[in-house]
Amino acid sequence: MAALIITFILFSVFILYHINRMTNLLCIQKEIPEERHEKIFRTVNILMVILLCSSYIEILYV
């Protein structure tokens, strides 16, 4: 059980890092104003955390 938790945390950090990296590249490519970056990153991160939590719960109870 502990191995599953550690693996999932590492997987989540990896996914969040790459999603943030891609979001940053999108903001740069589309020339989105700096004032909106914080809101975009907050929204993307909240949605990704919700998705990762639901995935963890699904793995845990299946």
Image: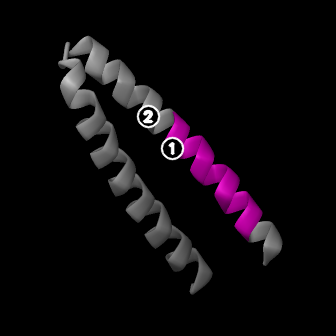
* Contact between labelled residues 1 and 2, with CB atoms less than 8 Å apart: yes
In the rendered view, does 20 fall on the left or right side of 40?
right
Query: Number of labelled discs?
Result: 2
The quarter holding residue 36 reads: top left
The residue lying at 58 percent from left, 75 percent from top is 59
Image coordinates of residue 38 in percent, x first then y, are 29, 34
Of the residues shown, which amino acid type is indicated by label 1? Leu
**Can you identify the residue that label 1 sits on?**
16
The quarter holding residue 40 reads: top left
Q: Is residue 14 magenta?
A: yes
Image coordinates of residue 21 in percent, x first then y, are 46, 27
Task: Determine the CA span between mark 2 and mark 1.
Answer: 6 Å
Q: On screen, 51 above or below 17?
A: below
Q: On screen, 58 above or below 32?
A: below
Task: Give the residue at the far front of this rendering.
Answer: 35
The residue lying at 64 percent from left, 51 percent from top is 11
* Range of residues picked out in magenta: 5-17
Image coordinates of residue 22 in percent, x first then y, are 40, 28
**Can you identify the residue that label 2 sits on?**
20
The quarter holding residue 6 reads: bottom right
Query: Which image quadrant: the C terminus?
Result: bottom right
The residue lying at 72 percent from left, 68 percent from top is 5
Main secondary structure type of the part rendered in magenta: helix
The residue lying at 36 percent from left, 55 percent from top is 46
Colour scheme in use: one colour
Element assignment for label 1: helix
Q: Is residue 8 magenta?
A: yes
Query: Which image quadrant: the N terminus?
Result: bottom right
